[in-house]
Image: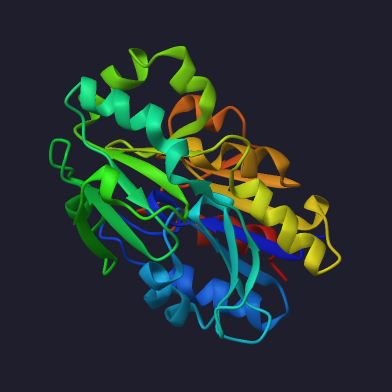
Amino acid sequence: MIQMIALDLDNTLLNSNKKISRKNEDILKKLHSKGIKIVLCTGRPINAVWPYIEQLGLTEGQDYTITFNGAMVIRNRDKHLLFQKGLKLKNFDLVHNFAKKNDLPLDILDFEKVYELTDLVKSTYKEVLNSNLEFINAQFNELPDKKYSKAIMSEQADKLDWARNNMPEEVQNYYHIVRSQPKIMEFIQNGMNKSVGLEQLLKHFDLDFDNLMSFGDAENDIEMLKASSLGIVMDNAKDDIKAIGDDVTLDNNQDGVAAYLEKYFKD
């Protein structure tokens, strides 16, 4: 029995205007009122997606969000942490050196803000993300030695294609590297993904992946889609992502989430 629904945001629940449509909102609120857990799964911190949480009414005592692509599971109402994993600054040496050698940008994220590295070429992450996240200019060697969530390389899609194809094996093997959007490539702790955070949350509620339905469209959704009892892929996803899902729904501009949920949970 499906008791939890996990939702990627960009190009999945959100339309091209970065909005949750009224149709998607209504069906998710209806299912939430019936006791089904609605969980947003994103690479962003919770404050960057808070308007969506409020719009869906996910502010009750047992509402959680998966953030930083699985590295943090946080209770929405009081920001209580259920789970958190991170990397030390030295763990980003390899990707920083690669970026510097090849005139590529890099941003380093802790669990609250973004450090835009000024010793490299300028990043486009702030413009592409278009969020209320705090951005701080800093050189890599000036960053404090603490835990960070990930690194972001934000550039034109063709330059990121080049970077991925020309990346040394030691860089490729050291990180879990995913394209969350065509212009964003993420460098995460190896073995970390959305399914890791979801597993922690499912255990918290004495559930397992048999109770999970998920929706996604991109590389950083693959593990979540595969692990779920039902992994639903948006029609706007690439064919290789569609191939790993259990079903395909309408695209994100056609209320694909609502269309599938209305069909699945019809009375």
Q: Locate residue 45: give its quadrant.
A: bottom left
Residue 227, above or below 171: below
Q: Quadrant of residue 231?
A: top right
Q: Position of residue 221 (x, y in %)?
A: 54, 42
**Closest to the observer, 182 or 16:** 182
Q: Position of residue 165 (x, y in %)?
A: 35, 14
Quadrant of the rendering where the C terminus is positioned: bottom right
Q: Give the image location of residue 192, x and y in percent.
A: 60, 42
Q: In the rendered image of this protein, does residue 55 appear above or below residue 225?
A: below
Residue 215 is left or right of residue 163, and the answer is right
Q: Position of residue 76 (x, y in %)?
A: 55, 78
Image quarter of the N terminus: bottom right
Where is 158 relative to 228, above or below? above
Total numbered badges shown on the rendered structure: 0
- Identity of the residue furthest to the left in this view: 122
Q: Residue furthest right?
A: 206
Q: How is the image coloured?
A: rainbow
Could you tell me which residue is drawn at 38 percent across and 59 percent down? 14
Q: Residue at x 55, y 51 (%)?
A: 86
Residue at 65% from the left image edge and 55% from the top image edge = 197
Residue sitting at 44 percent across and 22 percent down? 171
